[in-house]
Amino acid sequence: MSPGAVIGLDAGGTKLLAGSLAGEAGLQHRVYRRWDGGDQDEVLATMVEAVAEVRAAVGEVEAVGFGIPSLVDAATGASISSVHLPLDDVPFRDLMRKRLGLPVFVDNDVNLAALAEQRLGAARGARVVIMLTLGTGIGGAIVIDGQVFHGADGAAGELGHVTVDVDGPPCQGDCPNRGCLEVMASGTAMGREGERVAREHPASALGRALAQGVPVTGEVVTDLALRGDTDAQGVLELIGRRLGAGLVGIVNTFNPDVVVIGGGASRSGDLLLEPARRVVAERALRPSRETVRIVGAALADEAGAIGAALFARAGGVD
């Protein structure tokens, strides 16, 4: 497919971003939507409306790529199961082709974000790339030699469900495991640890926020940490060490060139990443611990939409 205009849409549990991509000029004609609940028809209709708005601004469009928070059947483009959106057992690709009248390509949202970072972002040109996105949960993806590794059933990359503590708390959602990286080091975990500190130290900034009725979320912890609050920075240190503990097994398994950390909870930068790097340097095996780079995502919240557009441009080939 020639490098004409393509549209990429990245759908998350609470919002979506769509935009067009021409060449490698970056995402243009951005359209944001937020949602809070809603049934399957409403979610699909919102996606169609967002694409239509971008399409009206662009004019002629060659194809549309979708990154959705779902296990996707690569052969059929069907959404098999989704934790965050009502997209279980939806013939997504065929349905969107019919509604849009355009070629449509679909994959898991983190897979496509990782693809974008490997081609245009923080892991540009790297051969083996691991990506983790830290938010409500932890998404993961594996890119090897420029192609997403999907596994036998398309379910590879669930790196948020690596066990960090075998006797740890029950994991989130439908996961039957305990002590997963997701429940230990996600944005949700960051907020939970921040609330613990707030209750133990009511005179702290976190404690004062809680007393004023402000929910102590990962975002609140990060904001305070970036402003220099030492208690909040201590929470990030703890979460960063836990992240590093999960990364040790991942680094030992895949021997990646680069581990990219994205998602909203990663905006704290080195306050989170440096503790993780230290744990990997101390505990991972040689030579992986000496060669791996652990970096923040370069494309921020546009990675998924850019990756979806790149995926569409390539005709659904990673």
Image (tube, rainbow, N blue to C red):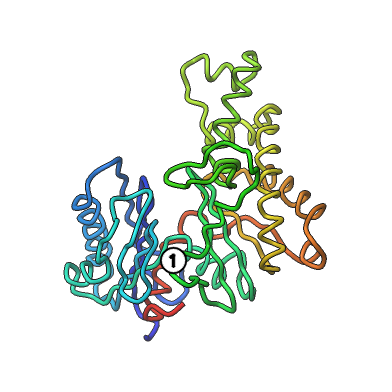
- Taking 300 as reference, is 173 left or right? left
Q: Position of residue 290 (x, y in %)?
A: 81, 64
Graded by Cα atoms within 10 Å as few (under 14), some (14 to 19) or many (20 or more), the crowding at tag 1 reads many
Compared with 247, 228 (above or below) is above
Q: Residue at x 37, y 81 (%)?
A: 315
Compared with 38, 1 (above or below) is below
- Taking 75 as reference, is 306 left or right? right
Q: Residue furthest bottom?
A: 2
Q: Residue at x 32, y 50 (%)?
A: 85
User: Which is nearer the eye, 241 or 267?
Assistant: 241
Residue 238 found in image quarter: top right
Q: Position of residue 192 (x, y in %)?
A: 55, 30
Q: Position of residue 116 (x, y in %)?
A: 50, 68
What residue would you read off at disc 1? Answer: 306
User: Which is nearer the eye, 288 or 127?
Assistant: 288
Compared with 35, 288 (above or below) is below
Q: Position of residue 183 (x, y in %)?
A: 55, 41
User: Total marks drawn?
Assistant: 1
